[in-house]
Every structure is written in C-alpha cells, then in structure tokens.
Image (spheres, helix red, strand yellow):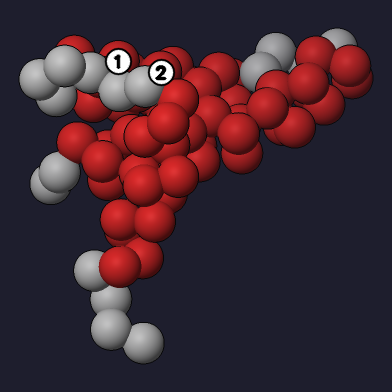
Amino acid sequence: MSTDFILFVGIVLAVLSLPPLLGSVMRGNPPRVASIVAVLAGVMIVYAISSRPGGYEFGDLPRVFQSPFSAFNF
C-alpha cells in the first residue's frame, strides 16, 4: 500500500469522524467509536507522513487525492 493511499484514507476517516464526535459530545454521550476512528485516522496520517522520504507539503495534497482514483480505469 502506498503512503499516498494511507494518507488519503487517513484524511477521509478524520473528516468523517468529526460529525459523530461532535454530535455525541453535544448530546452528552461518550464518543467511543468516533474517537477510536479519529485516533486511527491520526495514526494513519502520521505513519504516511513519517514513512515517505521528505514528507508531504500542502502542494502535494491534490496529487494525493487524485492518486487512488487514477489506479482505476473508468
């Protein structure tokens, strides 16, 4: 698995974990699953950044989001 794909999945999971995290905090419930997903997303992002030589820059993000979809031939 490439670091681009791991970073892509980590960012998507982080974004998708925010609404349930905030919703459960607003209702007063403990955010169990949402916090686990947020931690997993953070671990994936840190792993992808640390295992790629030179890391990532903000200019690389469009290419990171394009690379998983370019593997499929539509």
Q: Which residue is mark 1?
A: 46
Image position, residue 6 (x, y; %): 27, 38
Residues tagged 2 and 1 counted as in contact (Cβ below 8 A):
yes
Q: Quadrant of residue 64?
A: top left
- Res. 9 visible in picture: no
Give SS at disc 1.
helix
Query: Taking 59 as reference, is 21 above or below it?
Result: above
Amino acid at the residue labelled 2? Gly
- Res. 58 visible in picture: yes
Which quadrant does the C terminus fall into?
bottom left
Residues packed near mark 2 inside 10 Å, few (<14), some (14 to 19) or many (20 plus): some
Q: In percent of the image, x 30 and y 68: which residue is there?
A: 70
Image position, residue 50 (x, y; %): 18, 14
Q: In percent of the image, x 55 and y 18: which residue is there?
A: 35
Q: Quadrant of residue 5?
A: top left
Amino acid at the residue labelled 1? Val
Q: Which residue is mark 2?
A: 42
Task: Estimate the spatial distance between the alpha carbons at disc 2 and disc 1, rounded to whole Å.
Answer: 6 Å
Q: In percent of the image, x 61 and y 39: which residue is there?
A: 16
Q: In the depicted view, which residue is nearer to us: 36 or 67?
A: 67
Image position, residue 3 (x, y; %): 19, 36
Q: In percent of the image, x 16 and y 16: which residue is there?
A: 54
- Numbered circles on residues, count: 2
Q: Is residue 11 left or right of residue 25?
A: left
Image position, residue 51 (x, y; %): 12, 20
Q: Is residue 15 left or right of residue 74?
A: right
